[in-house]
Image (tube, rainbow, N blue to C red):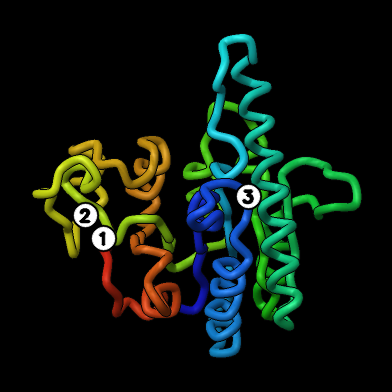
Amino acid sequence: MKRILLKLSGEALAGEKGFGFDEATCMGVAGQVKELVASGVQVGIVIGGGNFWRGRTSETIDRTRADEIGMLATVMNCIYVSEMFRHCGMAVKVMTPFECAGFTELFTKFGAVEALEKGTVVFFAGGTGHPYFSTDTGTTLRAIEIEAEGILLAKAVDGVYDSDPKLNPDAKRFDRISISEVVDRRLQVMDLSASIMCLENKMPLYVFALGEEGSIIRAASGDFNGTIITV
């Protein structure tokens, strides 16, 4: 693949601490992405906000406001991780769908693609810019817009299972499954709206565990320990 969209979960970047950032984990991601960029792969990145905010936790907070807090959590994550990348010698750009003072640039498809073609790693922060849409939907939307060849989903688990492997020790992992089956079976890969967008726009996904050594590089090559979701 020559252009990918890498989705990182905020929780994965927090490591064993479960909150905030684990610098060693972030630097490990940076090292793998640097290797990909050096080989000619164009990399866009979306980061979830779960290491800071997990949606509305109290009925006293309006849903729209809660989602706005989540958007800002993803902005913080992208600024932090992009700085790790810059420290490793990569050119980076953080783009948001809303004005964010001097911290980020306003997203446009053509600005993002131009940066990617120059070898810049582009971080897409702030989700879609609207409430009621998750970072899964934001990931799929940006992947479609920049015409990525696939979405790499780096998770805490090593693929897609027929049930939660944390709760069911007999859960079966799929090496390959179609996006239509993911939608029909309501498998917890991405939220339903994001999965349907992938189905309609023929966007393949590669699901793998971030914690496995070299997992991002292997997923980008298609030869990895995880699940390929076909279109």
Callout 2–callout 1 Cβ contact below 8 Å: yes
C-alpha span from label 2 to label 3: 34 Å
Kind of element beneath mark 3: loop
Q: Report the residue marked by disc 3.
A: 20
The disc, 2 or 1, on the residue closer to the chain's N-terminal end is: 2
C-alpha span from label 1 to label 3: 33 Å
Name the quadrant containing residue 188: top left
Q: Tell me the amino acid under the disc marked 3.
A: Gly
- The one nearer the camera, 10 or 39, is 10
Above or below: residue 36 compared with residue 122 = below
Q: Characterize the local packing of mark 1: few (<14), some (14-19) or many (20 or more) Cα atoms within 10 angstroms.
A: some
Residue that appears at 68% across and 31% down:
69
Residue lying furthest right: 102
Q: Horizontal and vertical percent for residue 32?
A: 53, 79
Residue lying furthest bottom: 39
- The one nearer the camera, 101 or 210, is 210
